[in-house]
Amino acid sequence: MPLLFKLVWEEKAGPKVRKLRGLVQIYHDNGLPGAPLTIKLNASVLLRWLGISTISGYLLAAGGLSLWLDQNPYNKIRFIDLLLPWHWSDLRSLRAAGYLEEGRGDLRAGRLPLGIMKLNAGLARFPQNLTARLELARLYAQFRNYRLLRAVLLGGLGEQPPPPSYLAALFDYAALMDDTGLVLAACNHSLRLARLPATTRTMVLAKKAETLLALQRFADALALLDQPDFQDYFRGAELRVLALCGLNRAPEAVGFARHWRQTHPDAPEYGLQIISTASRKNGQLDAMEQALRELARRQPINPEIQAFVVSEFWLAGRHDQALTALRASVNIFSNTPALLALAAQRFAILLSPELIQICFAEAKELNLPQTAGILVTLIQTQLRRGDVPGVEHSFAEYLGLRSRPPAAQDEYFRNWLRILVDVIRHGTPEKEEKLALLIRQVGLSLPVYQTSLDALATTQRWSAMQTVAEAGLTAYTHSTSLRNSRDLAGQKLKEIAQAAPRLTPPRPLPKPVVAAPLPAAPAAPPITAEAFTSQITELMTGRKWAAAADLLRQTRRAAPAWLSSAADDLDWREIRLNFELGNKLETAYLVGQRLRYRKTESIRALELAREAEQRGDRDSARIIGHRILEEVPDFPAARRFLEKLEAPPPKKS
């Protein structure tokens, strides 16, 4: 039987028509025998059914996918995001947010490799998330993986202007790695962006100028400082003075400094500082002294100003006046222990152990907790000066200190110092390799490399210097100072090889004041868990906080077998000791470390903040409270505590 298919828009009823839901009509045309069987499809009904089926399938697919995604507790994609097409452009970023949140959860649970992997997966899908990028950078810095740290920081520089907070963090990490190339790359990229805000542009230009000055590219720095963006920048005057002096244009720098002070009467102290620097560079020491004396008269109780005065006198070669000014400052600021350590750090930049010795003597006389840190600074400065007898004398005194911070009791410091002194005195390839191996195995910070290299350069141990610099470059791949030290050592070794027939021995070292070898570190006696608990409880009950803290540090260093099982108790004891000793920042840091992976202890931490408030120490209470909220944002009690603490006092009627 022949068949005839027809597609119609409207159906026509007939006596012998069979219908199927209004969609299909089947009948014999004209009702005549032998006529073909006609099948009509109603297009309007067909489209209606197709539309209903498509919408139903679409809703079912979106619902099923949403249910599947919701099985992951960190999922950020909602059903509405899958349903509405104009939300689809956000799916990639939402998926990335889920990976990032899941990665943070793994980090909080202590699954660091898995957490880092998921943070990377989230950033691969949404690289503009700078908060997650900085979290990953912090982890890489913590594990000293500077190659990946550099890559993750550079990945945050896109077509949108980076916020100042991200640039500031990038600059801090670059300083940690001594990577001036990273700083210049970030500055150049940011300055090419058309929509960079004016304040951010000024900050970036200033950082670039400082970096160029550090690299002694004075002409480039001066050209940058000539841009109009620096006209209202406060520190631009100081940078210009340094650039002009670096180009041997000190008289012009003096004229500029004096003109700047006349045109900026609202900042007389800053004007005197740049006049002093420019006059010293120009050899006008009387003008420098006049500016310094007026500066000291204007700011007699400002420790930063007094340290600047001492530094300027010392750099000008007027050491007697520098020592006199420092002794006077020490008498004024003896009740501010932290300032002695800050002054010692500043004088270390001047390579002046004489000034640091005064700070150490004052700290030792007052029995300050900063004494050991200042002595370590003195030892490092003596090393950089090549003063081996002074190092041995200071190190013997260092071992005799009764109370030292944890860094001063690190076994590595003794080994490093002993091997370094041995290399300086009797440099052999075996000893040099031993020093480099020790540094590589421990994974040290950059200042230790730099101190070692300065000491080796001063004593002309070029082969050892090259070995240590190459060892450092395996970790700090882009370090400017390590590359310069390696190149300098290589150049000196090449010159020595070329002048082999005329080779003269290196200058002899001065005879040591302390003839005895460096004393070995005293062995810590073993202690049982019961004895430790009894001793530290007795000390803390008697409010002997410093002695208890020293006992805790010694026990941690000895690392007895029971230490890991008592970790929770020891951590909270350490928090309590720092709290009682007034170490506000250390207390908040330790609280944050506990809460990062143990959210249930937030109530205990909040009790500590309330105790600080009850004692009248609102500053400590505020610092601890903010630290709690950083780690446990959804803690209403801590939020109410801070709101009450920071609320302004009621006005008196």
Image: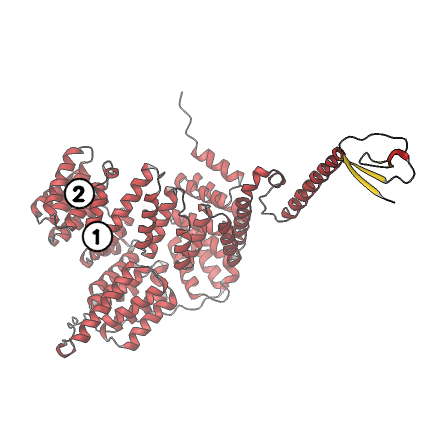
Q: Is residue 271 above or below residue 367?
A: above
- Tell whether 120 sits left or right of 550: right
Q: Nearer the viewer, mark 2 or mark 1?
A: 1
Q: Distance between the Cα atoms at labels 2 and 1?
A: 23 Å
Q: Position of residue 366 (x, y in %)?
A: 26, 53
User: Which residue does the image show at 32% across and 37% down from the upper left?
Assistant: 198
Q: Tag on residue 273?
A: 2
Quarter of the image for the N terminus: give it. Answer: top right
Which of 179/159 is in front?
A: 159
Quarter of the image for the C terminus: give it. Answer: top left
Mark 2 neighbour class, 10 Å CA radius: few under 14, some 14 to 19, many 20 or more? many
Q: Position of residue 456 (x, y in %)?
A: 23, 68
Q: Amino acid at mark 1?
A: Arg
Q: Position of residue 491 (x, y in %)?
A: 21, 68
Which of 371/13 is in front?
A: 13
- Indicate the secondary structure of the residue bearing disc 2: helix
The image quarter in which residue 37 lies: top right
User: Which residue does the image show at 78% across and 30% down from the upper left?
Assistant: 10
- Indicate the secondary structure of the residue bearing disc 1: loop
- Tell whether 605 sits left or right of 260: right
Q: Amino acid at mark 2?
A: Gln
- Tell whether 589 sits left or right of 211: right
Which of 469/538 is in front?
A: 469
Q: Is residue 651 above or below residue 600?
A: above
Q: Which residue is mark 1?
A: 217
> For the view shown, which residue lies furthest in the top direction?
653
